[in-house]
Amino acid sequence: MKRTIAGIAIIATLVVAAPEVRAGIVYLGIQGGVSRQKASVSGVKFDADSSFLYGARAGVRVMTLAVELNYFQAAHNLFTGSLALPGWNDRAIDYNYLGVNVLWTILPLPVIHPFLTVGYGYYTADVRNIDKDKSGGFNVGAGVELMLGKSFSLLAEGKYHRVSLDIDTERMKLGNFTLSGGLNFTF
């Protein structure tokens, strides 16, 4: 939570410190896509499950760097053929991410902006009728932004998320790959 607050403070500082260049660097966006999750508990691996994700983003861009507050939610199912974890098979898991990402535009062309991203945030997993936990974790990714004028852009990105959580006294490791697209509105 401290890092989220620090990220919001950085965004606010950049907005206040640069009023003459503020126009065109603050953006809000929506996103949707696919979340592919691979979970494991106590050495038992669950089958990979894909699900729809949706979320929002807000950021500040200065030259080739951007600091972004990002949120998404996805719902997955846990399936395994193993009898090692009775009661865990065929459970729904609600998965959320709220964090701060730094985006670096690696080749700032006039219309197309390919970028790399790294972030830290809080992941929450709620395994229905078993337990819920949240923990910090990192993500890395890459994407491309297509500028369609000064105030509108399309965005596509892929990220890999990794976090470990304690669910019902078991250490649950979640590896999650997200592929999302979205719209950004620049102010």
Image (cartoon, helix red, strand yellow):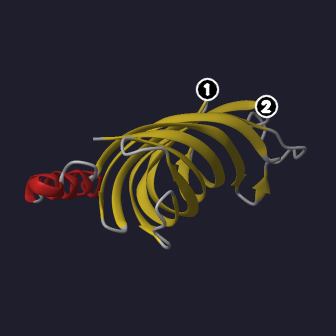
| Left or right, 137 with reference to 41 | left
The residue at the point 18 percent across, 52 percent down is 22
Tell whether label 2 touches label 1 (CB within 8 Å): no
Residue 31 point in image, percent of width and height: 53, 38
**Residue 129 has which mark?**
1
Q: Secondary structure at mark 2?
A: loop
Q: Position of residue 178 (x, y in %)?
A: 63, 49
Q: Amino acid at mark 1?
A: Asn
Q: Is residue 87 left or right of residue 124?
A: right
Q: CA distance from mark 1 to mark 2?
A: 11 Å
Residue found 57% across the figure and 63% down from its top: 141
Q: Mark number for residue 61?
A: none
Residue at the image point whose x is 41% and y is 46% from the top:
70
Does the rendering let one see residue 131?
Answer: no
Q: Nearer the viewer, residue 76 or 114?
A: 114
Query: In the image, is 6 to the left or to the right of 172?
Result: left
Q: How many discs appear? A: 2
87 or 179, nearer to the observer? 179
Q: Quadrant of the C terminus?
A: top left
Residue with the mark numbered 2? 90
Q: Nearer the viewer, residue 93 or 30?
A: 30
Q: Nearer the viewer, residue 108 or 26?
A: 108
Measured as percent of width and height from the top left, residue 71 is found at 44, 41
Mark 2: amino acid:
Asp
Bin the neighbour count of mark 1 within 10 Å (Cα to Cα): few under 14, some 14-19, many 20 and up: few
**In the image, residue 129 lies at what x, y percent?**
61, 26
